[in-house]
Image (cartoon, rainbow, N blue to C red):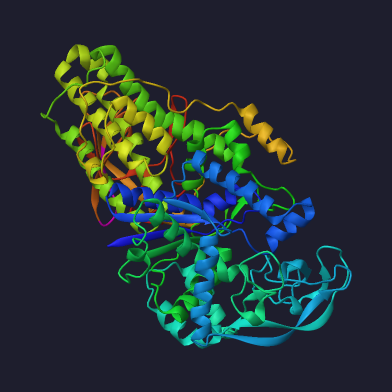
Amino acid sequence: MKILVTSALPYANGDIHLGHLAGCYLPADIYVRYQKAKQRDIIFICGTDEHGVPITIAADLLKKSPQEIVDKYYKSIKDSFTQFGIEFDNFSRTSLTLHHNTAQSFFLKIFKKGYIYPKSIKQFYCSNCKMFLADRYVEGICPHCHKAGARGDQCEVCGRWLEASLLIEPKCKICGSIPESRETTHWFFALSRFQKNLETWIAEKSNWRDNVKRFCEGWFSQGLEDRAITRDLTWGVKVPLKEAQTKVMYVWFDAPIGYISSTIEWAARIGKPESWKDYWLDHKTRMIHFIGKDNIVFHAIVWPAMLMAHGDYLLPSEIPANEFLNLEGRKLSTSENWAVWLPEYLKEFEPDPLRYALATNLPENRDIDFTWYDFWSRNNNELADVLGNFVNRVAQFIKNNYKGRIPKTTDYRNEDNEVLTTIEKTTQSLGELIEKFQIKDGLRLAMTLPALGNRYFDYQTPWKAIKENPKNCERTINVCAKLISSLEILLQPYIPFTTNKIRAMLGLDKRTWDEAKNPVLPDELKKIEVLFPKIDKSKIDAQVAKLGRKQEKETEKKMEITIDDFKKIELKVAKIIAAEKVAGTDKLVKMNIDLGTEKRQIVAGIGMVYPPETLVGKTIILVANLAPAKIRGVESHGMLLATVEGDNISLVTLDKELSPGSQVS
């Protein structure tokens, strides 16, 4: 089966910012990288949207031609994507003759089938500018939410698709004068004729995200209306009709056809000019559109209706639409320069810390806030202190104690096999999450592996074992090296620049996803380097200052979770009925606990503060749904709650007696 992935075409009137990345480009790139590691037949298609009013408005403001504007931003956008590691198979542009020809052919076929027709309408005309005003040339108050600044095509506040004639107190965006209504002719797409087909088609999409289906259902409940698809502009794809020589196609009619023309360009570029048909004309192909929620109406309603009208092309299989990314508690605003622009970011920082910070907090189901201090914390606390620390400490140990050669062994102990089994299970589970577009959960799962590696390394104390039990030390280091080898594969979709460094250290060729389950090891390590240098807080303060916000004395903080994350944790009252030290340890205590309906065994590192005999009879709070794990070969099924301040540990207890098994909420 073939997979065709697209990301929404960015307007070539400005640079890419963080909201764009989190909305549709980074999730798509992660998904495609994973699928390529699975050796699937997949291509990733995109390009710049170079027509429409946003381009002409930018040209008017800068007193340049539209072509100059799109040439500038095409290069800037493409370069930024490359530097950030977004790997398109083809990144095209809609100003190409190839695209114009493709869009005109598409238009004519629909027109000949009777789905496009002319209609006389009233349209705003600016006597001062001497021109009919296309949608975004008109601004006013939204008739639905009554917020100012609504455009003639859409209100960004409530997300409703508008007609300029519906705006309250409309004004010309260029000169600010009040336009008059005049009669003109435009060509309409018969969208209303496809409502029943669209409703049936979307009703079958049981696996689609709720936000997409709810959005579509809202439109259906109001009834779809035919939409004008021509504009009075000189810049754009010319309408291929003699009677419409002064018209161009509405940008949201020609833009999605850019997915087709970009695929045609890709096929020609690789020397297989007919191969684009294998993706667009084969209805077994999965076509996946990664978009932001502001593009749902066009990709889930208008575009599928256009494809149905045409009749030859496949329909989208998935439309994973993300919600919005906010910045420091406020909605991103390009007009107010309230944004973090990708070219500016790349001048100051490496790409992977941002890929990680965005991917671990993607707005998949709700709007999410990006803050510079959270970015700083994730780099320093998670990437540097967890992942980077694990890789570096193992690599340095191999270098210092084995002259860079990785110990070989197949004689694994139970605790070694537990780590290797976890690697295999995580590889499977992570792949399943990415397949379901749960990109954020996938990264969080993947990051449990370096955390596991650090715990395993600490418990095995190889710095002692190399003198006291060299064989055990070799097993430990071999398992740690295997974990690093797996991480190079599993984290590659998320942080590819870092995994390239790990792969160079291992001296291995690029491998497939499934090889992470039982990864190969080289004989010796190559160049060892620090993966994630700590970022000084002064650099973050400078970025916050750029936004004009007061610098706050914030400390590095743990990863934020949502209420939905918290609901996954099951806290219960438990009573300790027996306790003893784990043999060979000073601080590990094995406890038998009563949960009312069952008895369990847990292990906790509290023996230096709580002698086992003092624990019997105590009532504790237990994380009851934590997966069982083995600590120093002893099973622990649950985790007690305690506060830790330096060497001082205090159990979390209750102020009144409750029965074992009582739920804590």
Q: Residue at x 64, y 44 (%)?
A: 340
How many discs appear? 0
Quadrant of the image for the N terminus? bottom left
Residues rendered magenta in the picture: 591-597
Based on the picture, tell me whether residue 545 belongs to the magenta stretch: no
The picture places residue 519, in percent across and down from the top left corner, at: 22, 36
Give how far across and how far down residue 124 sits, in percent: 79, 77
Q: Is residue 5 left or right of residue 129?
A: left
Q: Is residue 58 visible?
A: yes
Q: Nearer the viewer, residue 649 or 414?
A: 414
Residue at image point 40% right, 26% down: 389
Residue 664 in view, yes or no: no
Give the quadrant of residue 320. Answer: bottom left
* Residue at left offset 63%, top offset 43%: 341
Displayed quadrant of residue 123: bottom right
Q: Measuring 43% from the left and 23% from the top, which residue is drawn there?
A: 530
Q: Position of residue 490 (x, y in %)?
A: 32, 42
Q: Residue furthest left?
A: 411
Q: Is residue 433 left or right of residue 70?
A: left
Judging depth in this view, the residue of 468 and 9 nearest the camera is 9
Indicate whether 527 appears above or below 60. above
Q: Is residue 594 magenta?
A: yes
Compared with 525, 115 (above or below) is below
Q: Say left or right for 476 vs 125.
A: left
Q: Nearer the viewer, residue 464 or 569?
A: 464
The correct choice, above or below, for 267 with respect to 519 in the image is below
Give x and y (percent) for residue 278.
32, 64
- Residue 432 vs residue 607, the one in the foreground: 432
